[in-house]
């Protein structure tokens, strides 16, 4: 009898101890991701996520009027229409009109420390490389702890990376959209490496999002030099290929710089220091691209238009643009479909929610979460909760908000919403 009690005690300790050990960060880094990958492959074999189609419910997408560049929101008086909509040239340059040094034919920055990412950690690893260029002595771990308290989180947003930089007293970061190849060269020529958010593809896993640090270029070979946390240091990518993959994320770029070099950044970015100008420029760029590209790239162009209109608070226009993007999605070859798109971007939630299309918010969030091997997107839970509150389903909303906090402890929007509901 006594021996049986010892055995039972040992089994209880074992059952309690194994999960505790498994959840330790070092174990998760070495083992946890492998278990997650195996589970994901099993689920995606049974239910291929690229076959799941989201169809908006509350809008007849075929009745959406054709959107031309001239239908963008009214441009403020500080920005003349010819600066944005001139038909005499391809479009306004991202470079300032003031005279600055010419751009050399090639450039390679050094002085940074390459770092390979731990599982699903390209954002923190890439930021760590960018910070190391300016003398920072850390690695990706504190950045990950700050930006994604849950190691299973699938994505870190650019503004979350920028928020971490704000914790460093001598450094600042600026992130903008609608970037161009010429701007990257200009920044590099003046000594600023750039973080890009871009598409990324692996043979078995398919399309996904990825961050890279651009540290050089070579006009003689039409290519950039990238510090890639997945593939390794000094990777190369052609200008056209980078532009294609960059399109998937609205040509988003983030620059880290010391406080004393703030004026240089202002000179390089020119009018794009002003965020509203930048958003209008990016919306124009996306609108132009809709009629220049086809296939998956056209899906991204419509999606970018929606994202930029959300940034301009034109939610009805953004919702119509997202409708067009989702209408194109089924025509993309299955192996090329960006089925992880909603892991990285929340624009459709904002557009449909503020356009009063609550059922579409719920359906999109549910589709996104159910298609995942691990439903860990706090943003999807949060926006579904808001839509459910708007429809009077407070109990289901509370569950979603608690799920958001479970997957991202300390997620401030969810905490605030629970407080407003009156639920601890």
Image (spheres, rainbow, N blue to C red):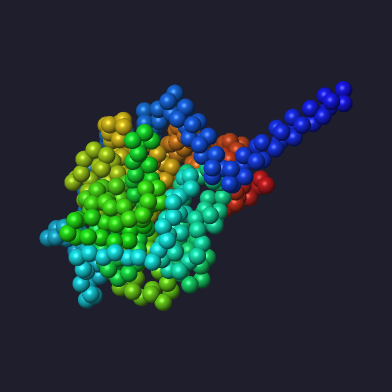
Residue drawn at (20%, 56%) of the image: 222
Point out residue 132 in the picture as x, y percentages from the top left corner: 44, 64
Q: Kindly tell me whether residue 336 is visible in this rendering.
A: yes
Tell me if I can see residue 71 in this picture.
no
Taking the spot 36% from the left edge, 33% from the top edge, the residue there is 204
Q: Nearer the viewer, residue 346 or 9?
A: 9
Q: Residue furthest front?
A: 3
State the residue in front, 307 or 167. 167
Residue at horizontal 31 percent and vertical 40 percent from the top? 325
Dividing the picture into quadrants, the one containing residue 269 is bottom left
In the image, residue 88 lies at what x, y percent? Answer: 12, 60
Figure disc tally: 0
Q: Quadrant of residue 395?
A: top right
Where residue 212 appears, x then y in whole percent?
A: 37, 53
Query: Residue 157: x, y in percent?
Result: 44, 52
Which quadrant would residue 313 be assigned to in this image?
A: bottom left
Q: Nearer the viewer, residue 156 or 348?
A: 156
Above or below: residue 129 compared with residue 135: above
Q: Report whether 97 appears left or right of 386.
A: left
Q: In the rendered view of the protein, which quadrant contains the N terminus?
A: top right
Residue at position x 58%, y 36% in the image: 396
Tell which residue pokes out farthest to the right in this image: 2
């Amino acid at each position: 009898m006594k021996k049986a009690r010892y055995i039972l005690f040992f089994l209880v300790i074992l059952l309690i101890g194994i999960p505790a050990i498994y959840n330790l960060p070092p174990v998760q880094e070495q083992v946890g991701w492998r278990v997650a990958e195996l589970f994901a492959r099993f689920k995606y074999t049974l239910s291929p996520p690229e076959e799941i189609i989201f169809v908006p419910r509350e809008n007849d997408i075929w009745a959406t009027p054709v959107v031309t560049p001239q239908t963008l929101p009214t441009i403020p008086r500080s920005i003349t229409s010819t600066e944005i909509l001139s038909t005499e040239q391809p479009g306004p340059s991202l470079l300032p009109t003031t005279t600055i040094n010419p751009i050399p034919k090639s450039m390679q920055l050094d002085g940074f420390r390459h770092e390979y990412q731990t599982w699903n950690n390209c954002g923190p690893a890439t930021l760590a490389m960018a910070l190391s260029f300016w003398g920072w002595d850390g690695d990706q771990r504190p950045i990950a702890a700050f930006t994604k308290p849950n190691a299973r989180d699938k994505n870190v947003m650019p503004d979350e990376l920028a928020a971490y930089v704000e914790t460093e007293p001598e450094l600042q970061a600026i992130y903008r959209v609608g970037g161009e190849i010429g701007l990257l060269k200009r920044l590099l020529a003046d000594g600023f490496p750039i973080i890009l958010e871009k598409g990324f593809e692996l043979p078995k896993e398919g399309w996904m999002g990825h961050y890279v640090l651009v540290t050089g270029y070579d006009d003689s070979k039409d290519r950039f030099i990238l510090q890639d946390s997945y593939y390794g240091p000094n990777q190369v990518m052609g200008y056209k290929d980078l532009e294609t993959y960059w399109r998937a994320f609205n040509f988003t770029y983030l620059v880290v710089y010391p406080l004393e070099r703030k004026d240089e950044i202002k000179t390089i970015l020119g009018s794009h220091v002003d965020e509203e100008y930048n958003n209008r420029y990016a919306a124009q760029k996306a609108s132009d691209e809709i009629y220049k590209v086809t296939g998956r790239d056209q899906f991204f162009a419509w999606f970018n238009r929606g994202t930029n209109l959300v940034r301009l608070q034109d939610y009805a226009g953004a919702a119509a643009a997202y409708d067009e993007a989702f209408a194109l999605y089924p025509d993309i070859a299955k192996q090329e479909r960006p089925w992880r798109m909603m892991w990285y971007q929340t624009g459709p939630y904002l557009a449909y929610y503020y356009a009063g299309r609550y059922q579409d918010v719920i359906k999109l969030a549910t589709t996104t979460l159910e298609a995942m091997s691990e439903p860990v997107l706090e943003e999807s839970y949060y926006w579904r909760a808001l839509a459910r509150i708007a429809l009077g389903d407070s109990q289901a909303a509370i569950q979603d908000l608690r799920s958001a906090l479970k997957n991202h402890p300390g997620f401030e929007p969810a905490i605030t919403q629970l407080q407003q509901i009156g639920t601890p």
